[in-house]
Image (cartoon, rainbow, N blue to C red):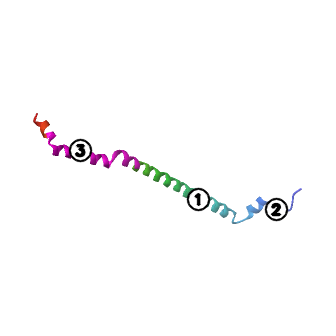
Amino acid sequence: MKSNQKRRWEELLEDASFETKISNQVHSRFRKEQTRNRTVAGFVFTLFVAANLWTFRDFVFDHNDLSTDLSFVIEEMNSGLLVHLGED
């Protein structure tokens, strides 16, 4: 026996705006996902750059060692020890 009441899926098939609703839902979900992916990628990139800058600053470009070495060389040149070693 067939029921005279329409089923939900039959109502949806007859609805003219059903396809538009589904399309809008899919587009909004993709937009949200793109935004989330861009946010995560930006955060990871920022952490990567910060870690590289910290590594470069600490291990490659150490200001204290450079100034200490330079002051040591200047003191040695002023003391004349290098000149005496060169004469021997």
Q: Secondary structure at mark 1?
A: helix
Residue in the picture at 61% in, 61% down: 28
Give the answer, above or below, for where 13 lies relative to 61: below
Give residue 1's position: percent from left, percent from top. 89, 56
Q: Quadrant of residue 11?
A: bottom right
Q: Secondary structure at mark 3?
A: helix
Residue in the picture at 40% in, 49% down: 54
Numbered label attached to residue 72: 3
Numbered label attached to residue 32: 1
Give the answer, above or below, for where 17 lies relative to 61: below
Q: Evaluate if marks 2 and 1 touch, with contact meaning CB atoms under 8 Å apart.
A: no
Mark 3 vs mark 2: which is more N-terminal? Answer: 2
Residue in the picture at 58% in, 59% down: 32
Prevailing SS of the magenta stretch: helix
Q: Which residue is mark 2?
A: 6
Q: Magenta includes 62?
A: yes
**Residue 7 in the figure: left or right of residue 38:** right
Give residue 21's position: percent from left, percent from top. 67, 63
Q: Evaluate if marks 3 and 2 touch, with contact meaning CB atoms under 8 Å apart.
A: no
Q: Which residues are magenta?
A: 54-82
For label 1, count other residues whose C-alpha is less than 10 Å away and answer few (under 14), some (14-19) or many (20+): few
Gap in Å between the C-alphas at discs 1 and 3? 60 Å
As shown in the figure, which amino acid type bears the numbered disc 2? Lys
Q: Evaluate if marks 1 and 3 touch, with contact meaning CB atoms under 8 Å apart.
A: no
